[in-house]
Each structure stands twice: as structure tokens, then as C-alpha cells.
Image (cartoon, helix red, strand yellow):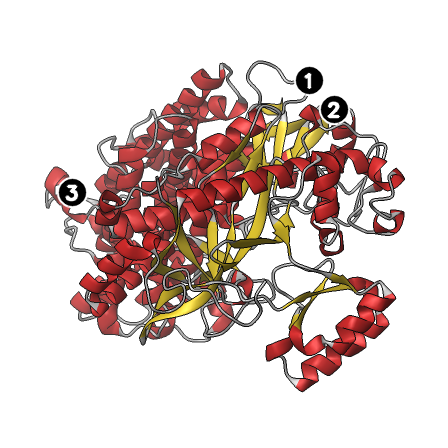
Amino acid sequence: MKVGTVFDEMWADGSSIRRPYKNIKTWLDGEERSSLKAKRRDANDLFRLTGITFNVYGSEEGEERLIPFDIVPRVLTSNEWTKICKGLEQRVRAINAFLYDIYHDQEIVKAGVLPLEMLKNNPAFLLQMMGVNPPGQIYTHISGVDIIRTAENEFYVLEDNVRTPSGVSYMLENRETMLQMFPELFTKNRVQPIQNYPQELLYSLKHTLPETAENKPTVCLLTPGLYNSAYFEHAFLADQMGIELVQGNDLKVVDGFLAMRTTQGHRKVDVVYKRLDDEFLDPLNFNEKSSLGVPGLFDVYRKGRVTIANAPGTGIADDKAMYSFMPEIVQFYSGEFPLLQNVPTWRCAIKDQLNYVLDNIHELVIKRVHGSGGYGMLIGPTATKKDIANFRRKLLSTPQDYIAQPTLSLSTVPILTSKGFAPRHVDLRPFVQMSPEKINIVPGGLTRVAMSKGSLVVNSSQGGGTKDTWVLEN
Amino acid sequence: MLGNTANGLFWTYRLLERAENMSRLIETGQRIALTRLNSSDEQWLYVMQTAAVASEYKRYYSKIEKEAALDWMLKHPENKSSILSSITSARQNAKMVRHALTTDVWEAINGSFLDIQNLLKTKIRERDLPIVLRTIKQSAALVRGATYGTMLRNEEYDFCRLGTFIERADNTARILDVKYYVLLPSAKAVGTSIDNVQWETILRSVSAYGGFRLEYGHEAGPGDIAKFLILDKRMPRSLIYCCEILKLHLSSLCSTYRNKPASFSQIMQLQKRFLTHDIEAIFKFGLHDFLQKMISLFADLSDQIEIDYRFYE
């Protein structure tokens, strides 16, 4: 891993254009800058009209923002993609096996590969899930694995999102927008289609049915509601899959089964695609203050009478402290070496590692173990003295809440700025769907891009943008 | 279909209809203010009474002034029935049931909301009023057209239409009731023409000024106006027309669900008891009493629809 040098996916070493970007360059060279800017405005109007907005937590209620969209696509070759896919499949299968194991016999602990402390007192480890058998033995119906690139052949997994991965609607809408704005690009380039994602998702959901499901199973999407930051995505996916979009107050446990309130009374539900944190799922079994969930839902689940996707308790696998064990986890369950690499990670809970982190804080990225969305992290090389002092204090008082990683040079891809094209750092979130029959990965994923110069923070909640992601046909 | 979805569709269309009715009332008020030499700011009180927002207005303002009245009806944050409030809530409801609407309908509603919100952002000067009102009317037409042209004729559509026509029926009954006394047959009214400012207000409020003249002629009297707005089946805002459409969609739900809930018997009763007589019988019954009765029956019907189709837990 090279630290400090930046790999540009269009220009590589800076002089010659990389092959997959040749057509992109020809296209951009032939366009007037002003007409591209006009197109970008059109794209924003389109996003507003369609309602592809997100709500920012902590901002005025109902305030809706657009995620900045950049018109220069990010391109991957079919060979690169095949490699990534193999790695993803191996990793996601291992994570699913890991979840089954830790909620049953805990062989991995008995084998001495994972210390018991990693499970004990970990709020992401859901005791209620012990011994529960999810339909089809599937925990992670959908995974969003964040991948970064640092060189021609270097891809790393940065995070495994297996609780409630979001962002897939942007992947789909970015492509729709590009199709509408630059149809000729798709005539000149053979880009692998992604439009069947919702159908594939419905397939995975309908193939992990509880045994009590009848011929025509009922699937619904459970949203926390209008003010959730990802509400647009919930409505979008429910619409695309042709399933009901429900909130907690639409659901109720009736005669031991989960049911939704239709215009004709309560009707049984077989599969819940849950876009709600576990904690809020069921006030009787989890957080009693939750008004978003369904009282008794978890009891129905435990009896095997409903599928919840993803299964409750999956959060233990994408916990940032657990992340550091992922190479061992993959190897333990697959019997193979991991195909996708992990970023080296220091666990601050361990004394020696904490000392290393404190000594090298200027070069490291410090993350909260249970944080997400890019909140509460420190990027050593760009942080102020005050921030560093602040984090030092936090590390000393609650070291178990933090991990540290080297500041990786995420690869860059050009974006259109007000002053012309300029490289910006990107990551990639492919979406992996799993059912007992198969694993499906839509070619591409969501490319997130840090819009300001030099920034490594790609999270939309922190001003990050997105790009259309192309996987070329061979 | 979820009870909650039915609820969201019903209210989306109710609120859109409400916004449109309000804009029509404002337009009427402005038209009369500009074309009648003897009109005063006081006539905005009538307009607000018709829109059922006058008493709230008086809590915030001591005087009836045109500018304040316009602001109140267009966008005052304390007025829950202002055009901006109605359209914002309509869009909120539509967002909730986004998956039950076609893309065309959703984009029409969302686009209209964005346009109107943008227009109402700044203080509305008198010269901006025509463009604001025109945009609202066009938006309503766009949503109606997209609904008509792209929605499947299924239960979802039934609930959309029920929302529109409950609101419209209520609106027409209120418009009539606020001025019911000018429509009563009396010795004084004989010989006056429909140029009467009161009548013009009523007719314009339901976009029926031209239509009425065409069908009933210049010699028509106030009784004819009442007949036109209550019993004329050709008039798309008359009470009888609204009830026909309500019955149509309630009966369509009955056949979809193979049952006949209370709301269906209510609309049948309502029609049979109150809309099968001629206008003279209604006058004899008492126009005001009749309209009050209708308003309360529409409210009952709306409540019953909520219960029958499980809008709430």
C-alpha cells in the first residue's frame, strides 16, 4: 500500500490516459464547457422534480437537499469488476456464516480466532438473536460493501455495511439521469445495465420465505417515515418492486402473525424489508421508547413466521472493531485467503495499539467504533491542533470506542468544477444481494465523491456527491 | 392496499382541491375589486367568509385590508387553509403515498409544489397576483390531467376521486351558504339582473359565471343560481354532480371488495332524501337549513369513509 501518492483512475501516472477512460476523454474534449454546465443544471432540476432529495439530520424539519451529482462517469473494466465480485461474494458468504455461528455455537470463539470480549458487552451483539434461525439461514440479504482503490491493482474493503445499507436509489437514478442527458454515450460505450436491481432484490426477498408463507407471499418495506434521511429511497424501492411501503403503525401482530392494516382489515405479511435500526424494531423486545416499530414483531420472528431483511443483529458484523478481524473471519469460514484486502486497523481498546495510535495520530484516521455517516471522525493529516488534542482526550478516556487506520490515498476521478475538470477522491459501494439460491451483484454500485479539493470525506451527510458508475462489457 | 395509503391519497386530492378553490375565491375577490367602482376592502371579508378563513383572520388583524387578506389566504403561516399550507400538506401526503401514484402524477404534484412555493417565497405585490393565481390553476389542471390520463382505474383512483369530490361538495355548499339570503326568492329581487355583485361573486367562485349565463340566460333569477349549483347535473361543481361521482366511486369500491359498508348506504340515503326534489321544495325546507344539513352530511360521510376503509388504527 502506497501512502501519499494518489492514483488517478483517468490519468494513472499523470501523462497517459488509462484505456477505460479513452472514450470519456474524447467525449469531454468535444463538449463545450458551458453546455456541460447547463446539462448539470438540468440534472439538478430533474433530481428536484423527481424528488431525489435527502433530509439532513439536525437541520430544520423538512429541509430537503440534493446530493451533488457529477456528470463525469466513473469507469471500471469488466476484468476489474470480475475480480471485485469474486472478493465480494467470498466476503459476504463468510459474513453470513459468521453471523449464524456467533448466534448459535460460536465455533469461531471456541477455535480461539475471535476473542469472546468482542461479543460480550458489545451493543451491536443482539442477545435476543441467540439460537434464532432466520428463514433460509440468511442474515445479510443486502450488503453494501465500501471499497476504495489505491493503485492499478489495489482494492481494499473499507467498511461492510450489513445493517441497513442505503444509497442504491442514487445508483439507479444517476444512471437514469445520464441516459436522459447523454443518450449518445450509451450508444458509443457498452455499459453493463443495472436497471434490474429492484427485481433482483424482490427475488432475494421472495426466496427467503418463512415456512408459514403461502403461495402468494406478501412483502413490504418498513420505513421510519417521511423525515428519515433516506425516505426517498424507501418510497422509490417500494414503488419499483411493487410492494407496500409501511410504517410501524400500519403493522400489528394479529393471532401470532405479523399483519398490515389494509382497507379491508389486517392481512398477513411474510417478508419485511426493514429500513429501520434494530433498536427501534419492537418496543417490547428492544428499545421500549420506540414508536416507530411494531410491538411483538420480534416474537413472531423468533417463531419463524416472518422474514426480516436484513436480520436483526447483523450490526455486529459491520462494527468497526469487528472489521479488524475480517481477514480471519473470511478465512475461518471460507477456508480460503481473502480475495479483497482489509485496511490495517488498530484497535484502541488494546494498550499497545492505543500507544501506537497516540504516537502517530497525525498520520492516522480515527473512527468511532459504532459511528457512521462520517460523523465524529478525525483525519490526522488535515486536522487542526485543537481537533487532535480533543481526540487525544477522547482516546484516553474511552479507548474502546475507537479504531485507527492509515490515511489511505483514495483514488481520484475527474469532476466538473466551476473552474473546469479537477480530480477528486472517490470510493465505491457495490450492493450484494443474497438468497439461499444465489448471490447477485449488480454491475457497478454507488460511487461517492468528495466534492472539495483534497477532501477524503465522501459521505453525503458531509457534502459528498455521487457519480454514475460504469462497468464496461468486454 | 393499506388503509394508510387510502388515507394519503384521499387527503392529497382533498388538499389540492382546497388550494384550487381558495385561488378561485381570491381571483373572484380581485376581479370584483377591480371592476366594481363601489367595492371596498370590506368585500374581502365576504371572500374570506366564503373560504371559511375569516374568523381566524380576525384573530390576527383588527381591520379588513386587501393586502393582509391576500397574504392571509395565499400564505400566512398561521392560516392552515392558506394555499401554501394546503399545497405543502398535499405534497407531504403525496410523498407518503408516492408508491401508489404514477410517476407523472407525482412529478406534477411535486413540480407544482416547487413552483408555487417559489412564487410565494417573497411578498406578493398586486401585479404578481395574476401570475400566481394562473400558476396555481394550471398546476391543478396538470395534476388532474396526469391523474385522468395515467392512473389505473382501481381502488387507488377511487380514493383520489373521493377526496376531490368530498372537498368540492363541501366547498360549493359553503359558498352557497355564506350568501344564501341573496338567493332567496323575494319581492325585492324581481326584475334585478344577474349583474348583482353578490351573484357574480357566487358564480365566479365556482367558475360558472359564463356557463350559467349561457344556460339560463340574462333573465334568470337568484333561484336559478341555487338550482344550478345544487341540482344541475351538468355542472361539475354542483352538489348533485359531486354526489353522483362520490356514489360512483363508493360503489366501485363495493364491487372491488365485495361488500357494502356504511359509507355506501350513507351516500344513497343522502341522494334519495335531499337531492331528488326540485328547488322550490328546497326553498320550502329552508335553503340555509338545507345547506347546513348537507355540510354536516358530507362531514359524516368523510368520517365514515375513514372508518370503513381503515384510514387509521
Mark 1–mark 2 contact, CB under 8 Å?
A: yes
Label 1 to label 2, Cα distance in Å? 7 Å
Where is residue B129? Give x, y as percent.
Answer: 25, 67
Q: Which dot marks residue A304?
A: 2
Q: Is residue A41 left or right of residue A100?
A: left
Q: Between A383 and B151, which is closer to the camera in this rendering?
A: A383
Q: Between A118 and B203, which is closer to the camera in this rendering?
A: A118
* Element class at badge 3: helix
What amino acid type is highlighted by mark number 2?
Gly
Quarter the N terminus of chain A occupies? bottom right
Badge 3, how many Cα within 10 Å: few under 14, some, many 20+? few
Badge 1, how many Cα within 10 Å: few under 14, some, many 20+? few
Mark 1 / mark 2, whichever is N-terminal: 1
Label 1 to label 3, Cα distance in Å? 63 Å
Q: Is residue B108 above or below residue A373?
A: above
Where is residue B37? Give x, y as percent.
Answer: 17, 71
Q: Kindly indicate whether the residues beneath marks 2 and 3 are on one polypeptide chain.
A: no
Is residue A139 visible from the viewing direction of this image? Answer: yes
Q: Kindly indicate whether the residues beneath marks 1 and 2 are on one polypeptide chain.
A: yes
Q: Which dot marks residue B300?
A: none
What amino acid type is highlighted by mark number 1?
Glu
* The furthest residue to the bottom: A385
Q: In this view, does A229 lie above or below B299?
A: below
Q: Kindly indicate whether the residues beneath marks 1 and 3 are on one polypeptide chain.
A: no
Mark 2–mark 3 contact, CB under 8 Å?
A: no
Give the residue at mark 1.
Answer: A211
Give the residue at mark 3.
Answer: B211
Q: Residue at x 52, y 30 (%)?
A: A202
Residue under mark 1: which chain is it in?
A
Badge 2, how many Cα within 10 Å: few under 14, some, many 20+? some
Which quadrant would residue A367 be assigned to in this image?
Answer: bottom right
Residue under mark 2: which chain is it in?
A
